[in-house]
Image (cartoon, rainbow, N blue to C red):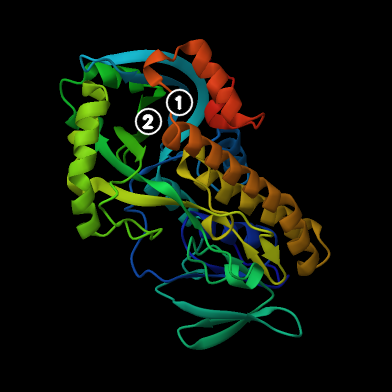
């Protein structure tokens, strides 16, 4: 990023993936940008996995959002298993699934490197935003007011900007949680048989009431890590708190024994060992929420990433949506005659797309967690039909009909 052209001022609230991408977009469109991130600490230590479609990665590299040298892990298909009565794996199907897997922290660092320190204002708390009658908006940062022509809410699930676009829009609890973790492949001795199936593939082990997904990601040193996510209902005896944040240590402690038993009893033993050997310090629990919106932009505000529509992790769309939002924002700011016109175009292009992913996530949650099939009696043909019925004609890269080349 060089010296911005004087096309106007844009505030970006939130410095995560969506925020960095939005800041890059606004700058590339010729605006002066200020990004406000409340945390005083670097965000790169978040080391869980995240996936993108390969064409989107290529587009973001070519557009200057991401570094081509960033470590990635190519995935070409997805193995589906369930547990045999003796604890071994029963292979059900191998489906095409062309995706590129990242370490969240490395993806964020690549985006962050494109945002100068003078733009990325670390440790700055936005406490209020408001629209001005004459146009534009005021952002209150640490008690000080600053005026902008456009405000991008990239401040996540609990966005303070969202209420100015869609008042009273509140994410809804899906009725189940995810338990996730990541572990170095080198720390999984004597599991060569399952690790060999995760060289360039993802894997899903289905059980009654949920599933667990595994896929490889690069660590900071480029070596392989295994990222996993378990989806299931929590025990009724545990109050998960219905917070969209990761569960507290006390809730995590209450949930852990039930999830340990689930893995031991319902997941093929060798696959379960990946989960059970993951250190507690890199495991996390999170209730699943989602949110459809009537609109995702209303001048002078636009929403990006999880501040906009909230999608379930099954769709593997969190990073995808954030980057697509940014690319759209850059395009409409370049092509429109005014900020208001750009905001209208952004809403027209991004809101329905976001809602479609929310609806897909609900169908995936229903079919893969809340109303799971009789996994043991599924086969390739039934699996293919089952997935097609869930997709309902929607095209999603994690189920892409593209084989390894």
Q: Which residue appears farthest toward the right when viewing the image?
A: 337
Look at discs 2 and 1 and give the one toward the viewer: 2
From this viewpoint, is residue 136 visible? yes
Residue at mark 2 = 215
User: Considering the numbered disc 1 on the image, is that residue within a helix, a strand or a loop?
Assistant: strand
Residue 75: image tag:
1
Residue 2 is marked as none
Name the foreground residue: 250 vs 94.
250
Helix, strand, or loop for circle 2?
strand
Q: Is residue 16 left or right of residue 23?
A: left
On the image, the x and y values in percent for residue 164 come to 63, 73
Task: State the image quarter where residue 201 is shown.
Answer: top left
Q: Is residue 121 left or right of residue 197?
A: right
Depicted 55 relative to depicted 258: above or below: above
Q: Residues within 10 Å of mark 2 (few under 14, many from 20)?
A: many
Look at 50% across and 30% down and name the residue there.
Answer: 99
Mark 2 or 1 closer to N-term?
A: 1
What residue lies at 15% left-to-right and 24% top-to-bottom? 189
* Disc 2/disc 1 C-alpha distance (Å): 8 Å
Q: Quadrant of the N terminus?
A: bottom right
**Which residue is farthest front?**
236
| Residue 74 position in % (x across, y down) | 45, 27
Q: Residue at x 25, y 46 (%)?
A: 283
Locate residue 126 relative to residue 359 in the image: left or right.
left
Disc 2 and disc 1 in contact, CB within 8 angstroms: yes
Front in this rendered view, residue 65 or 403? 403
């Amino acid at each position: 990023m060089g010296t911005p052209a004087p096309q106007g001022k844009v505030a970006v609230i939130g410095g995560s993936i969506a925020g960095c991408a939005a800041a890059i977009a606004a700058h590339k469109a010729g605006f002066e940008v200020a990004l406000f991130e409340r945390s005083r600490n670097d965000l790169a230590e978040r080391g869980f996995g995240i996936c993108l479609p390969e064409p989107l990665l290529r587009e973001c590299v070519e557009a200057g959002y991401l570094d081509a040298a960033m470590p990635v892990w190519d995935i070409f298909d997805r193995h589906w298993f369930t547990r045999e009565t003796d604890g071994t794996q029963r292979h059900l199907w191998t489906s095409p699934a062309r995706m590129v897997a990242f370490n969240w922290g490395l993806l964020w660092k690549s985006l962050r490197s494109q945002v100068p320190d003078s733009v990325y204002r670390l440790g700055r708390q936005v406490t209020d935003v408001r629209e001005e009658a004459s146009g534009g908006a005021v952002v209150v940062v640490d008690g000080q007011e600053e005026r902008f022509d456009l405000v991008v809410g990239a401040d996540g699930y609990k966005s303070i900007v969202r209420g100015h676009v869609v008042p009273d829009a509140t994410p809804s609890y899906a009725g189940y949680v995810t338990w996730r973790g990541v572990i170095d492949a080198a720390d999984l001795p004597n599991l060569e048989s399952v690790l060999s199936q995760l060289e360039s593939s993802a894997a899903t082990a289905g059980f009654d009431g949920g599933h667990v997904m595994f896929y490889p990601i690069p660590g900071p040193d480029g070596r392989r890590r295994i990222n996993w996510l378990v989806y299931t209902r929590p025990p009724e005896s545990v109050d998960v708190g219905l917070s969209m944040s990761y569960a507290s240590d006390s809730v995590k402690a209450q949930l852990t024994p039930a999830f340990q038993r689930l893995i031991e009893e319902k997941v093929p033993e060798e696959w379960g060992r990946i989960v059970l050997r993951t250190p507690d310090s890199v495991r996390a629990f999170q209730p699943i929420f989602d949110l459809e919106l009537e609109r995702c932009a209303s001048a002078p505000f636009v929403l990006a990433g999880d501040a906009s529509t909230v999608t379930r992790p099954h769709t593997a769309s969190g990073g995808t949506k954030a980057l697509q939002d940014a690319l759209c924002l850059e395009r409409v700011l370049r092509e429109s005659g005014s900020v208001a016109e750009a905001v209208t175009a952004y809403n027209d292009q991004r809101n329905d797309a976001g809602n479609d992913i929310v609806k897909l996530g609900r169908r995936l949650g229903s079919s893969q967690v809340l109303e799971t099939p009789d996994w043991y009696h599924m086969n390739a043909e039934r699996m293919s039909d089952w997935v097609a019925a869930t997709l309902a004609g929607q095209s999603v890269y994690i189920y892409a009909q593209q084989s390894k080349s």
